[in-house]
Image (spheres, grey):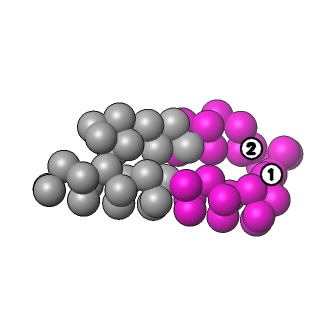
Amino acid sequence: MALCVNIPNLCFVYLSHTVAPDAPLSLATVGLLVTLEKFGYSFGFVANML
């Protein structure tokens, strides 16, 4: 469950390395990655609390 809290950080690392002014990502891709990050963090946080 600790991995569920930390692995979503890879979404932000991916976004920071691939997005550039000359090569933007689509809104759907950004939305999907942020959704995965929020789900993974929330799941891991609740699991660690329990």
- Residue 19 in the magenta stretch? The answer is yes
* Residue nearest the viewer, comparing 2 with 22: 2
> Magenta span covers which residues?
12-36
Say whether residue 6 is visible. Answer: no
Q: Amino acid at mark 1?
A: Pro
Q: Position of residue 1 (x, y in %)?
A: 30, 41
Circle 2 Cα neighbour tier, 10 Å, few/some/many (<14 / 14–19 / ≥20) = few
Q: Residue at x 38, y 43 (%)?
A: 4
| Quadrant position of residue 50 | bottom left
User: Is there a contact, CB below 8 Å, between mark 2 and mark 1?
Assistant: yes
Q: Amino acid at mark 2?
A: Ala
- As helix, strand or loop, the secondary structure at mark 1 comes to loop
Residue 20 has which mark?
A: 2
- Residue 25 in the magenta stretch? The answer is yes
Which SS type dominates the magenta stretch?
helix
Disc 1 target residue:
24
